[in-house]
Amino acid sequence: MTVRAASSVLVGRHRELSTLRDSLGRARAGEPTTVLVGGEAGVGKTRLLEEFTGWATDGEARVLVGQCLELGEAGLPFAPFAAALRAVLRVDGPEVFAGYEAEFARLVPELGRTALAAPSAAPVGDAPRGYLFDLVAELFQRLADARPLVLLIEDLHWADRSTRDLIGFLVRAARPGRLLLVCTYRTDELQRGHPLRPFLAELDRVRGVERVELGRDGTGAILADLLGAEPPARAVDDVHKRTQGNPFFIEELAVAGDPIGCAALPETLRDLLLARVDRLPEPAQRVLRIAAAGGTRFAHDLLAEVAGLAEVELEDALRAAVAAQLVVADPDGDYEFRHALVREAVHDELLPGEHARLHARFAAAIEAQPHLVAAGRSPAEIAHHWYAAHDHPRALVAARAAACAAAERYAYAEQRRLLERALELWELVPDAATLLGMDHLALLEQTLDAAITAGDFSRAITLTRAGLAEVDAEAAPLRAARLLGQRGRLLALLGKSDGSEELGEAYRLAAGGPAGVERVRLLADIATYLVKIDPGQASRVAAEASATAVALGEKLALLPTRIALLCRGEGNLERGLTELAEAEAVARAAGDTPALVLAKVFRSDVLCELGRYAESAEAAEAGAAEARRVGISRSTGAYLLSNRAEALIALGRWDDAEAVCAEAARIDLSGVTGLHWLQLGAGLRLARAHPGADELVDRALAFLSRPFLWPNLRLPLHELGVEAALAADDKIEAVRAARVAVADERLPQLPREGWPVLSAVARTAARVGDRELAAAVAALAADLPARHPAARAHAAQVTALLAVGDQALPAWRAAVDAWRADGQPYPLGRALLALAESAAAAGERDEVSAAVTEAAEIARRLGATPLAETAATLARRVGLRGAGQGGAGAELLTSREREVLRLVAEGHSNSRIAERLFISPKTASVHVSRIIAKLGVTNRVEAAALAHRLGLLAEPATPR
């Protein structure tokens, strides 16, 4: 009986196949959809995807496939995307890249030749990683617009970090419509600490992502298909026991053992996987061993070069392997092991000397003829093979070369790992400094820069510690100062400390270092870092750097420092805008991209502080476009998103602001750099009573537990904590948070952030009647400058919140006027309701009606549910009908209920009220219950207090 080596049936996968088909249906409808298919090796992931992609292609969907390579975390960056884009290039030609061939050449080097002929293309070096990610997403969107697109990424457990980052960007940020992203991975590879585990957990939280885990079943059906006959029940039980239902293992056992009884079964998994290999002729086995050293996929020409066999011999050996279905040929003319497990088993059987020799031959072959591997792959392949060959000198040089190649592809995480491999090998290579042309500290500094660029701040701090332990501060003060400056900034970014100690020592070393451009730039960097924690010291350091820079003609080195100092000081902001425009022009002319984007960030920030919110939003939007053009939209340019969100919130364009916050959230910045949008988004959700408000508020407030937080970030969190407690009617927590806020020593020095805090604390003091808290607010407010519209409005609001008696109504009128002048609708709406309460107490019924009506309309426009509910409750309490449409209607309380309320306010019981009004106690009780319900309070004490505050106890006017 002939036994097929692979089953043609898809057993027990109807549910999973249905899930994939449904997902493609959602993608067709424009909903971004991702499916993560997991399962142990051999469980049938590939077979399931073959069935699905065949069905999808028949349905006129386009399928692109990319596979991750077994080179590990320091492997070839973006390998699966490069493979998918090569398929696009073959089918659609370079025109599909829409003039961005130079940028896409980072992934598909073959496009570089086309890009050289395109004069309109931007220089390759001008497109950093964030820009490249955007271009990839836009390309997939264009392809999907033409027909539904399925992008299949196989073997995600082997993915490098850059590949994971791009997948995460497509899933969380870009979310192209009509694209179904399917990723497969081995569950048995995900041991503790595997980088894919947290990545999968992160993707699970994204809307539109579904995970499918494949189990083991269908042993009998697979055996029947393989054998061409129904196997005995005993055979099925025996095979199932040995394979636990794994389809690949079932196939191997069926081929290795007796066709019917499967009597002679290999004892171990490795024996099982090698059983079919062992039946090959010796020349074919030898070729398979060589191929296994090259990886799961291998090119014919590369294998021929390494094997050194005559073409006929090689072809005969490969033909035997293909016939045994151990190797399959792909459409590109290359080969692939039918299953990675087979390749692993063969590779593991190599003798130590054989292992090193074969990997060395692969490395040498690729070094001599890089075209033997796909374009762009040679540096990573060479580094991998020399490392596997244990040739330490060559592995050292290759690792650094591969790191440089990774940086050119914006794969900074892989660059850092390859440089760390070089650091590891350094001690094993006596002449390492000669081979690399640098000392060990220089290599460590390069690794540190790569870690910072990749956002690996925790690892970067460890590297600064190693560098400082190695550097001789006396012999190389500027190198030591640079390391200290980087460490101080990193500590602040991670909230571990303010970094002042490190920055102070960095300045001491730099000040005494040799004069020159390097020293000027270092002093400028130190001044920039110091701006947030010690503006005075920052100014002194900047002045020293400036004096030296002028003498050297290096004024441009001070641009970032000048911009930061300009915007952090308390000078004339209007004049500052002019200087910012000049700095921006100088930076643009000089091609100083970091300074240019920094100017854009601060310009939008200054405009917002000046109350020019529409201009701020426009400037931030334009700045974001500029950041994207020069390729830093996901670093410094990310701040433009939160600045724009802040301006949009002030303008009352809350839906747009939420969209911008969501975009900023998807960037997932490290340390505290993403806190601004988080605080804004939490406040926005709180004001809208969004179901996810608590989660976002908790995430933001968690930053307060860090040892250090810049005060311009810390003070808004104090405000958020107080407002969150008030929204939850948690008076105890509100008072606690308010006391912590007013005790912040930096509040008196930061009016922009301090005034909103004082408003929140004053609101708490007024609500709970805390005189001590009110006095603390008054003392701080007396000395806090209010130079700009929002600050002046907050100052007027604080005055109104602390006012008592007859002072309250004019104070709230002034606060409302101030908020009108500033132009922010939400605080205006809150002030209008407070004005309405004061006006009601003073008997100004027309003013009450107008204020409540306007506040209700603001709440409706913003979608501010709590504000709308407060307006509706106040309207009911003061007897307004249809407040949102204007005009007062019939009184809320009947004349009898007003009489009862006056007696309740005097402290009478229901029995006493009944005596006074000549009604029964039961009737009096009914009246009291109705009054409590109409006023929206919980008891008669609250009803009495509210009646006093709203002026509901006045005797009705006597009709004439």
Image (tube, rainbow, N blue to C red):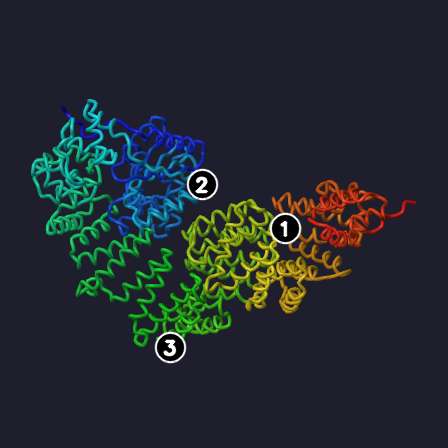
Toward the viewer: 608 or 175?
175
Q: Quadrant of residue 444?
A: bottom left
Residue 858 x/y as whole percent:
65, 46
The residue at which mark 2 appears reads as 207
Of tags 1 and 2, the one toward the viewer is 2
Residue 451 x/y as whole percent:
34, 58
The residue at which mark 1 appears reads as 826
The numbered mark, 1 or 2, whose residue comes first in the sequence reads 2
Of tags 1 and 3, the one toward the viewer is 1
What label sits on residue 20 in the rendered view?
none
As helix, strand or loop, the secondary structure at mark 2 comes to loop
* Residue name at image x 70 percent, y 55 percent: 817
As helix, strand or loop, the secondary structure at mark 1 comes to helix
Task: Specify whether residue 900 is in view.
Answer: yes
The residue at which mark 3 appears reads as 512
Is residue 409 found left or right of 913 in the rendered image? Answer: left
Is residue 129 found left or right of 956 in the rendered image? Answer: left
Toward the viewer: 69 or 61?
69
* Residue name at image x 52 percent, y 61 percent: 714
Mark 3, other Cα within 10 Å: few <14 / some 14–19 / many ≥20: few
Residue 522 x/y as whole percent:
39, 69
Toward the viewer: 403 or 708?
708
Say which amino acid is labelled 2: Arg
Is residue 158 found left or right of 814 in the rendered image? Answer: left
Say which amino acid is labelled 3: Gly
As helix, strand or loop, the secondary structure at mark 3 comes to loop
* Residue name at image x 70 percent, y 48 percent: 937
